[in-house]
Image: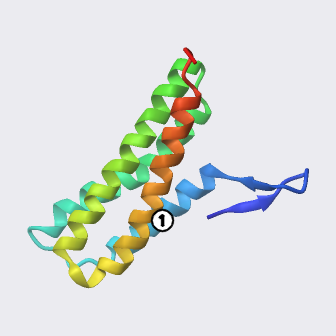
Amino acid sequence: MDERAGESGEREFDLDERTAVFGEAVIAFVKQVKLDAVTSPLVTQLVRSATSVGANYDEADEAPTKKDFRYRISVCKKEARETKRWLRMLAAAAPLLKDEARVLWKEANELSLIFAAIYRKSNPNG
């Protein structure tokens, strides 16, 4: 989402900003959902998982050890995957919002793949 030209002229990838924008987009999305007995718990779970992705990335970025970094990245990956689940369930509960949910699902999927790659590359054994 946020890519800027770095000093070398290459595009800089800002994952902190991307996860923040993602959380904000999910918050804007759920404000459109009509709350009822089915959608209310789904919205709560979705907001928790979607905003947790960025919060845990912030923690990973400040991790004092490689082990803690790797753990926090694994939590980012888990929360992104969980967000995909809640988006799917919410789209089923509020079909009129399915197209918007699909866009957010795609971003959650990309974040999940990114964090999975970071996790694999941070493996101390290889």
Name which residue lies at 17% across and 69% down.
39
The coloring applied to the image is rainbow
Q: Position of residue 41 (x, y in %)?
A: 17, 60
Name which residue lies at 51% across and 32% down.
119
Q: Position of residue 89 (x, y in %)?
A: 21, 64
Which of 115/38 is in front? Answer: 115
- Label 1 sits on a secondary structure element that is helix
Name which residue lies at 41% across and 47% down.
52
Tell which residue pokes out farthest to the left in this image. 37
Where does the N terminus fall, quadrant-wise? bottom right
> Is there any visible trace of residue 69 in the rendered image?
yes
Tell which residue pokes out farthest to the top in this image. 125
Report the residue marked by disc 1. 24
Left or right, 95 with respect to 49, comes to: left
Q: Position of residue 100 (x, y in %)?
A: 38, 77
- State whether residue 93 is above or below residue 46: below
Left or right, 20 with respect to 95, comes to: right
Tell which residue pokes out farthest to the front in this image. 126
- State whether residue 11 is above or below residue 29: above
Q: Quadrant of residue 35?
A: bottom left
Amino acid on which disc 1 is placed? Glu
Q: Quadrant of residue 118?
A: top right
Tell which residue pokes out farthest to the bottom in this image. 96
Count of residue discs: 1
For mark 1, does the 10 Å Cα neighbourhood hold few (<14), some (14 to 19), or many (20 or more) residues?
Answer: some
Where does the C terminus fall, quadrant-wise? top right
Name which residue lies at 26% across and 77% down.
33
> Is there any visible trace of residue 32 in the rendered image?
no
